[in-house]
Amino acid sequence: MSVDAAELKRRTAELLAAHPPADTAPADFLTARFAAGLAWVHYPVGLGGLDAPRALQAVVDAELAAAGAPDNDPRRIGIGLGMAAPTLLAHGTEEQQRRYLEPLWTGAEVWCQLFSEPGAGSDLAALGTRAVREGDDWIVNGQKVWTSSAHVARWAILIARTDPDVPKHAGITYFVCDMTDPGVEARPLRQITGEAEFNEVFLTDVRIPDSRRLGAVGDGWRVAQTTLNNERVAIGGMRLPREGGMIGPVATAWRERPELRTHDLHQRLLKLWVDAEVARLTGERLRQQLAVGQPGPEGAGMKLGFARLNQEISGLEVELLGAEGLLYDDWTMRRPDKVDFTGRDAGYRYLRAKGNSIEGGTSEILLNIVAERVLGLPAEPRTDKDVAWKDLAR
């Protein structure tokens, strides 16, 4: 049956009548919402969706928000929602999809990403974590780094080298790793903010069943592109209201504290306000494009703009506040389960924004992607393209 906006409103009303938000535990409501196909309406029936157009998700979200229904705290489970779920949908088996997608969406199971390594960050395909086949299992050894939420995650999306005798992009396989398995150790990485939001993860003889492999053996790079394209959209293309995100606190301070204003700061704030609004509307257009297709390299451009804007806006905020902007609320070592850009002070925003041009793909790499895949410019020379990974200089 074709599902339109009216049908979605009817189904949402039925969900609310059967599970009134005021009388239903949030976890129970989210489980019922998933079962009703109102989690991701564009996903298949039985996997949280109704095979409806992706653009109609906004209809459901608006009805539930108006009714005071709980959400799934998307900032806490952003890696699962924005990266693991679309990869599972595109490349997972039916058994994998049915096992992982519901607890992923409800937030019952948190996910992290085991991609970057100390010697393979920007050049991710140079990764050296090894996975060796042993019967129906793979034995994994290696080290990953910059892993958000590893200390609270149950599952991880993992890429590892399964064939060192072929060029680096060809010998990679994609797995789902249980973070509670023996041999998985997450160690905190303290950041400039004082927190340890990231981790380094050591994998020692970790046994992963072949049933938790996504895609074919050696096809991990192609599977990883699904993850990476969705990651850039998830980071750079978040849905925001006007003056949402980093520009909001600066605009509020400007309106409420006229004694801080100068002509130069006014001109800079106006420019950044316009840039933030352009980025917001561009993100909305990108999401509309996604409603009829899959994310492509355009997400790299959004991620680039997100990083630049956050860094410039947070720098302006510190200048606007003067001596007050140099204060910092708390250097306590913590291991938070999510990033809170707007809930902390200006000093935190300024320091944390420095990571925006690194996480989710460095700005330098994303500039290459935009140049080559969006603008069609000649690719940079790559002398290692046809060299076996084991023969590369390291």
Image (cartoon, helix red, strand yellow):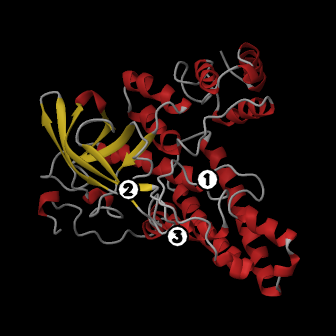
Going 58% across and 46% down the picture, which residue do you hit? 75
Q: Is residue 315 visible?
A: yes
- Residue 310, x across and y down, in percent: 62, 67
Q: Nearer the viewer, mark 1 or mark 2?
A: 2
43 or 375, nearer to the observer = 43
Looking at the image, is mark 1 or mark 2 earlier in the sequence?
2
Q: Amino acid at mark 3?
A: Lys
Q: Nearer the viewer, mark 3 or mark 2?
A: 2
Going 76% across and 34% down the picture, which residue do you hit? 65
Residue 237, label in figure: 1
User: In whole angstroms, how far apart are the C-alphas of marks 1 and 2?
Assistant: 28 Å
Q: Is residue 150 above or below residue 48?
A: below
Determine whether the residue tagged by mark 3 lies in a helix, strand or loop: helix
Q: Return the residue at label 3.
A: 354
- Residue 50, x across and y down, in percent: 61, 22
Q: Are marks 1 and 2 in contact (CB under 8 Å)?
A: no
Q: Amino acid at mark 1?
A: Gly
**Is 88 on the left-hand or right-hand side of 9?**
left
Q: Amino acid at mark 2?
A: Pro
Looking at the image, is mark 3 or mark 2 earlier in the sequence?
2
Going 55% across and 70% down the picture, which residue do you hit? 351
- Residue 247, x across and y down, in percent: 72, 65
Sort mark 1 into few (<14), some (14-19) or many (20+) by Cα contacts within 10 Å: many
Q: Which of the 4 image quarters holds residue 52? A: top right
User: In whole angstroms, how far apart are the C-alphas of marks 3 and 1?
Assistant: 18 Å
- Residue 178, x across and y down, in percent: 32, 35
Residue 188, label in figure: 2
Determine whether the residue tagged by mark 2 lies in a helix, strand or loop: strand
User: In whole angstroms, how far apart are the C-alphas of marks 3 and 2?
Assistant: 19 Å
